[in-house]
Image: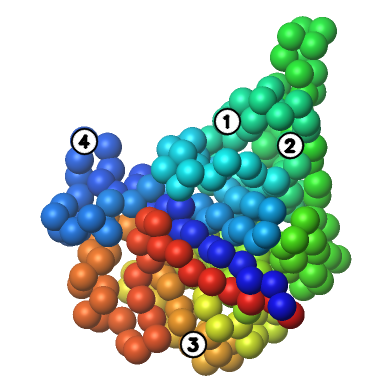
Amino acid sequence: MTRYKLTILGCGNSPGTPTICNNWGVCDPAEPRNRRLRASLAVQAEDTTLIVDTGPDFRYQINRTDIARIDAILYTHAHSDHVNGIDELRILRLQEKRLFPIYGNEETLATLRTRFAYLFDELEKGVYPKVLDPHVIPCEAYGAPMAIGAIRFTPYDQDHGTCRSLGYRFGDAAYTTDMLDLPPESIETLRGIKTWIVDGCAYHTQENRVHATLEKIYAFNETIGATRVIITHLSGQMDYRALCAELPRGYEPAYDGLVLEAFDS
């Protein structure tokens, strides 16, 4: 049995908490777990480290967690709060003298190639070397296990309102961020997990067109059956202690630096 260490590098929504100019919304600045970087996850096992998403806080998140080596990046989608730290991979490319593997759906990698073309191709006769080794996760691979080093993961489809995003299952845990809805086949992929890190950014706002409400998460989990549900992608309208008091048994808010474990047979 393989043990995975999962570290929430950031649990904030796109502007983070506090937002620029120190706007805390309804969050108590005296509660350190209200200070949130943009959403990202580290998954570690034996000598393998995978990172899910490289947002604007990527360098700080990796340095703060003291991660010495990254084997690959798994992308959920190409929105800026999940990809804009990708340039940091250029430094790893120079230090380690290797192309850097990234994984995502076809839409995500196509968008990254457009926005960060200089990372995909050698420029100026080698002055700026190619950085990335892109791997498309095709639709037919959803729901089937893949492996990088010592870590197995299963990608699954998510509806993010304006685009399709990917979630990832790691043994008996799963990471579902930037999700408005889940198709039945993805719910089936998640069925039986013990720990579910899931986007609840809409909170109780039914009009949100890109994120799930808490009520939708509760309904999904009646089928999925996770015994520990960690709500992530939190906004400045979601105070940590207020959430602790509100959420039912088995549910809790994420915070930056939270460490979890999962097991894969």
Of circles 3 and 4, the one toward us is 3
Of circles 4 and 1, the one toward us is 1
Instruction: Work out how far the residue at label 2 is from the one at label 1, CA to CA, in angstroms.
Output: 11 Å
Circle 1 sits on which residue?
Answer: 88
Going from N to C along the chain, the mark reached first, 2 or 3, is 2
**Quadrant of res 15:** top left
Q: Which mark is residue 227?
A: 3
Q: Amino acid at mark 4?
A: Cys
Residue 144 on image: x %, y %? 81, 71
Q: Amino acid at mark 2?
A: Phe
Instruction: Work out how far the residue at label 2 is from the one at label 4, CA to CA, in angstroms.
Output: 35 Å
Circle 2 sits on which residue?
Answer: 100
- Which residue corresponds to the image point at 74% horizontal and 9% vertical from the top-left? 127
Circle 4 sits on which residue?
Answer: 21
Q: Residues within 10 Å of mark 1 (few under 14, many from 20)?
A: few
Residue 231 on image: x %, y %? 41, 70
Going from N to C along the chain, the mark reached first, 4 or 1, is 4
Q: Is residue 44 left or right of residue 118?
A: left
Q: Secondary structure at mark 1?
A: helix
Q: Is residue 165 left or right of residue 122?
A: left
Q: Secondary structure at mark 3?
A: loop
Q: Secondary structure at mark 4?
A: loop
